[in-house]
Image: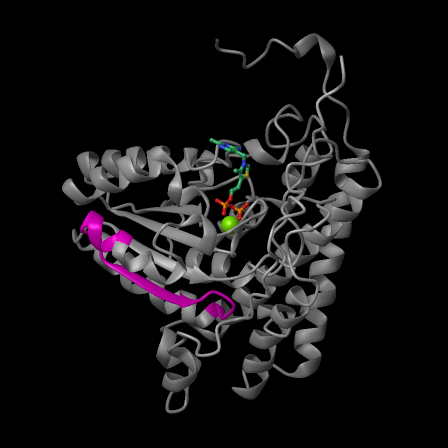
Amino acid sequence: MAKPKVPATATVAPKSAKIVLRKPPECTCSQTGRRLKDARLEELTGLSQDRLVGMYRRMCLIREFEEECATLYRSGRVRGVTHTSQGQEATVVGTTWNLHDDDYITSTHRGHAHILAKGGDEKACMAELLGKATGYCKGRGGSMHIADMSKGILGANGIVAGGAGIAVGSALASQMLGNGRITVCFIGDGALNEGIAHEVANMAAIWKLPVIFLVENNLYGMSGCVDDMLAVGERGFFARSDAYGIPGSECDGMDVVDVFMAVGEAAERARGGGGPSFVFCHTYRFLGHHVGDPLTYRHKQEPGLWKKLDPIPKFGELLVQQAIATEKDVRTWGEEARKAIEEAVRFAEESPEPEPSLIMEDVFA
Ligand SMILES: Cc1ncc(C[n+]2csc(CCOP(=O)(O)OP(=O)(O)O)c2C)c(N)n1
Ligand SMILES: [Mg+2]
């Protein structure tokens, strides 16, 4: 019997697919540039210079982690499938910088950045990717199963939109306990179309739960473009949030300050008993769906256009313009991030393999 023809990877576009060049939005929704004309960054954000610098350094750490992860995967040292998020750092860090240590996040299959941005440990993450006993899941879970309850990180998730159910459960628990903690649910543009996303958005709205649905609109869910996959189209997103009765806002996901401000409003609403919010961030993944994605569905010129908006140099320049840092500081912080990740790789590589006799440990079902 002839073998069925299957594509080498699920992200290969059919030959008939129309490839559209998706430019960054001409008229950006960012409010930050306008507001910054008359204000200092510290006044606008309420963040100290140290916290602003911390934002920049965390974005650098995440970028270096992801670059290293892709290298390790290509050399065969990380196995399985690896999803990286170069380009999305501002969306993630701008969000978590609004959170307290005891607030919660739920993550996705593209979760390294979420975990590191909520204070996760890069060494334990790297060791997990390399399957070592010192990893977050003792080397048994890999990148899509990292959680750290001590940091409010309720877990990465290989089930698209699976985190949404956990996030709403977490927000319900916080409401019942009256502990004042809020939960951010990171969710992709593609994941918005999963059944559970509709179900829990409705629950969050009727119970006024302290949860923020942070939509990372990176334009694609695997090879499917958001405009083809969202019946109301990318611009119709507000029709969706209105339909749930949940306030929605959008922001420039390539601008960490803009994200910080938009999520700040949503966090204030959640902390004040005002219930859930949707924040729709326009961002982009510079690489493919996973490392090794042949990218046949995306116009070749597209990443180059978006890379001009790279959130890391952009924020570095802003810190220099505002005299919060010198160009040398910015370079040094980048180098320090690289060294921290080199150190994490060294730690992971020198760590022991999991002990085979412990294979049944932590197995509950
Ligand atoms: C329930 C479920 N359906 C399908 C998949 C396969 N899958 C993995 S990632 C993905 C796309 C998700 O797209 P999006 O939510 O936009 O996240 P992004 O990859 O862009 O970060 C799909 C369909 C899955 N893992 N789980
Ligand atoms: Mg997506």
Q: Is residue 250 magenta-colored?
A: yes
Q: Is residue 105 visible?
A: no
Q: Quadrant of the N terminus?
A: top right
The residue segment tinted magenta is: 240-256
- Residue appearing at x 66%, y 75% in the figure: 330
Residue 195 in the image: above or below residue 101: above
Counting from the top left corner in percent of width and height, residue 143 is at 62, 36
Q: Is residue 275 left or right of residue 355?
A: left
At horizontal 54% and vertical 12% (from top left) the residue drawn is: 363
| Farthest residue, direction bottom | 38
Residue most extreme to the right:
75
Q: State how the image is colored.
A: one colour
The reply to whether the magenta stretch includes residue 294 is no
Question: Which x, y percent locates residue 103?
Answer: 36, 46
Q: Is residue 168 left or right of residue 336?
A: left
Residue 129, above or below 52: above
Q: Is residue 77 left or right of residue 290?
A: right
Q: How many marks?
A: 0
Residue 295 image offset from top left, x and y in percent: 69, 51
Percent coordinates x, y for residue 306 in the rendering? 61, 69
Q: Residue at x 39, y 42 (%)?
A: 193
Decide which of 144, 357 is in the foreground and name it: 144
Q: Quadrant of residue 39?
A: bottom left
- Does residue 281 appear anywhere in the picture? yes
Up-down: is 238 above or below 139? below
